[in-house]
Structures are given as structure tokens and as C-alpha cells.
Amino acid sequence: MHLLELKNVHSGYDGKEVLHNVNLCISEPSIYVVLGPNGAGKTTLFRTISGIIKPQAGKVLLDGIEVFPSKEIRRKMNYLSHNNALPEEMTVYDALRFYANMEGGNPDEVLDLLKLRDLKNKKISDLSQGQKKKVSIAKVFLREREIYLLDEPTANLDPIVSKEIRDILLELSRDKIVLYSSHNLYEARDVGTYLILIKEGSVALFDRISNIRSSKYRVGIRANTDISKIVDAKVGEGGYYVLSVDTPEEAGLILRDLVNRGVIVTEMRQLDNPLQELFDENGDTSTAT
């Protein structure tokens, strides 16, 4: 088990401070979703943890050793930028082999892991943005690391590929620490165990996602009959029968009652994302830099 610590970290660029007095202590293998409105400092946080930029003050420690300037400690981490930094004139295979020669790893294994075999001989410049993102992710998985810092890993990917990436990360997080930024609040809730909320360069919240509850709880139900005659529900968004309850447990009791009455419930889902409320006061859910 590894321990990642940020102690009173101030960081930024060209003398301008972006992160202010950030303190974090991360030790449990899991997925830590990093969220924040535009310009909050998520990318700066990743670059500071990975040692790409030196903190202006404070310390980033991995297992008690400062990340900057230790090259050996930095080699225990892998950072995926939200930008696809790839050699455009190389083929996919040659690019991965180039990185493997520097970092180690097997290009053929990651081609299979990310299902890139059909693109093996294509030039990077001929790929779509989504395909380039997959190659960037493949580069990250060439060599096993202890800490993975992934800045928008599913951006520009279609839903099927996004799910494949999430499944890989969920498996990885069984014994690795994964920090994962996303602009998709529903994806964040589904894939993450912990939430690190960054606002105006500071950690506004660090908690288990399961502890974050909505102030309101609306449930959408699809059924084989008009349930508005049984419960206080109205047809609303997406064709769901929508009802408001105080707790998830109350929704479960309503579901049980409907089933006992012979209603066939084909779908039941929460309509409000509790993470959305964290951003409502800002009016901005876009990804930070």
C-alpha cells in the first residue's frame, strides 16, 4: 500500500499561484474522481503531483519521499494529459514501441488491451480524436505504475469505448491509486469511490461519493400501467413517472408496494445527480485546467 500526501501545497505557473494550500492524504487503492468548474486547477493539481511542475511552497510526497525532484519516485507514477501528445508521423505501433524503448513495456499487449490492433499500421495523423485518445491511454498502460493520474481519459470517446476504459480503470483500482478527472458528472458518480472537489484552487470537498446525498430525491419509474393511480407520480422527463421522496429507502418501499400490487416495473432510477448540486452555485460544470 502506498501513501500519497500533499502538504500545504501552493503551485502554479510563471509566478502565478493556481493552487492554494492544498492538503490531501491518499492511501487506499481506489478511483478518486477530481472535479471542479472551469479554471479551478485540476490539471495544475495533476501536473504538480506528477512532478512536472515544482510546488511554489509545500510538499508532494509518495511514501514519505518528495516527488520533486526525485526521478525514481516520479517513475512510480503515470500521467495522462488531456492533450494527445503523440508523434503525428509515426504509426500507432511505432509510437508505442518508441515509448516502450524509453519506459519499458510491451506494445503488443496494450494494442490488445485497448483493442487497437486494427490501427497498428496507421499513422497517428490519420486517426480520429477518439482514436488518438485511445493510443494515449495505451501509452499510459505500457508499464505498470503505482499511481495513475488521468486527466479526462474518456473525453472524445464514444460510449462503448468509454465503458471499456472505465472497466479497465475499475480493475486497475483494485490495487492501484487512480486519480481521474472528468467533465461527466454521471460518469464520475458511477466510476469513482472518492470525490476530490477543486474550487478556486483549493480542495472544497474530499469524501466518499456514497456520502454525498441530494437535498431532493426524485425517482423515475417505467411500468406496464399508469402508476399515477397508485402513487403520487406524474409523467415527466423521458416518459418516466416522476415522484419525489425523502430518502432512497422510501423509494424502495414504493417499488415493493407496486410489485405487490401486480405492477411490472421495467425501470427505476434516480433522476437527480447529487454531484450536480456541488456546481449549481457556480453555474458551470465544465472541466478545469
Image (cartoon, rainbow, N blue to C red):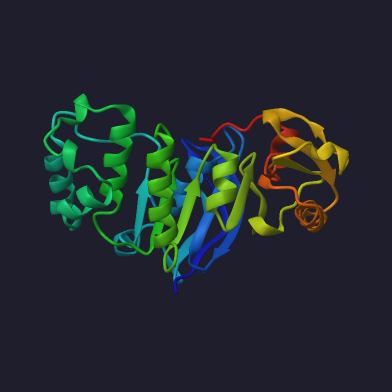
Q: Position of residue 109 (x, y in %)?
A: 19, 55
Dividing the picture into quadrants, the one containing residue 216 is top right
Taking the image as shown, residue 244 lies to the left or right of residue 102, namely: right
Relative height, residue 111 to residue 210 (above, below): above
Q: Position of residue 162 (x, y in %)?
A: 42, 42
Assign the N terminus to one quadrant of the image. bottom left
> As rendered, which of 254 and 270 lies closer to the eye?
254
Does residue 52 appear anywhere in the picture? no
User: Residue furthest toward the bottom?
Assistant: 1
> As rendered, which of 268 and 190 lies closer to the eye?
268
Taking the image as shown, residue 258 lies to the left or right of residue 131, namely: right
Dividing the picture into quadrants, the one containing residue 249 is bottom right
Dividing the picture into quadrants, the one containing residue 271 is top right
Which residue occupies 48% across, 53% down? 179
Q: Position of residue 173 (x, y in %)?
A: 44, 62
Taking the image as shown, residue 184 lies to the left or right of residue 252, namely: left
Does residue 256 appear anywhere in the picture? yes
Relative height, residue 39 to residue 269 (above, below): above
The number of numbered discs placed on residues in the rendered structure image is 0
> As rendered, which of 27 and 237 lies closer to the eye?
237
Which residue occupies 13% across, 45% down? 98
Q: Position of residue 174 (x, y in %)?
A: 44, 67
